[in-house]
Image (cartoon, rainbow, N blue to C red):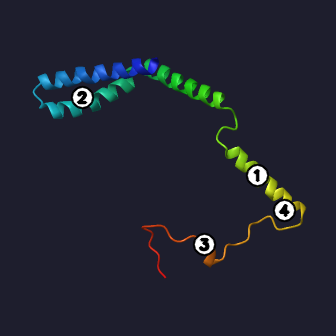
Amino acid sequence: MPLVVYTLVRLALIAVVWVVLWLAGLSWPIAFAAAILIGLMVAYLAFRGPRDAAARWLADRAARRRAAKGPRASGIEDDADVEDRAIDAAAASGQDAAPAPVPPTARAPPTIGRNVTG
């Protein structure tokens, strides 16, 4: 797993920088915060290969999961098909395809925390 390798390399780099800064005389919390910042910057600049391999692995994994679910797994396409059929049926019967406006009395009550003036 390239993601695990890249994460372990980053954590090792942060640990090494932390120990060096702590031995240089910084207090451990300040050394730790500085080590995280320095370690992440150095890892970004120096470890491009492992980072790219981890990104490719994540992209491949996402593509495999999407392919396993199929094209209509989310249900969004089903909703769009129902709406399209309703609009086509309304157009075929000569009705206006736009929905009728909702009268103010039929609207849902305001949600909690919403500033409503009346």
| Residue 91 image label | none
Disc 1/disc 4 C-alpha distance (Å): 12 Å
Amino acid identity at mark 1: Val
User: x and y percent of residue 106 in the render?
Assistant: 63, 74
Characterize the local packing of mark 4: few (<14), some (14-19) or many (20 or more) Cα atoms within 10 angstroms: some
Residue at the disc numbered 4: 90
Mark positioned earlier in the residue sequence (1 or 3): 1
Residue at the disc numbered 1: 82
Mark positioned earlier in the residue sequence (4 or 2): 2
Residue at 47%, 75% (x, y): give it: 116
User: x and y percent of residue 29 in the render?
Assistant: 17, 34
Mark positioned earlier in the residue sequence (1 or 4): 1
Characterize the local packing of mark 2: few (<14), some (14-19) or many (20 or more) Cα atoms within 10 angstroms: many
Q: Are marks 3 and 2 in contact (CB under 8 Å)?
A: no
81 relative position to 25: left or right: right
Residue at 44%, 73% (x, y): give it: 115
Q: Are marks 4 and 2 in contact (CB under 8 Å)?
A: no
Residue at the disc numbered 2: 35
Disc 3/disc 2 C-alpha distance (Å): 55 Å
Q: Which of label 4 and label 2 is nearer to you?
A: 4
Quick one: SS at disc 1? helix
User: x and y percent of residue 112 in the render?
Assistant: 44, 67
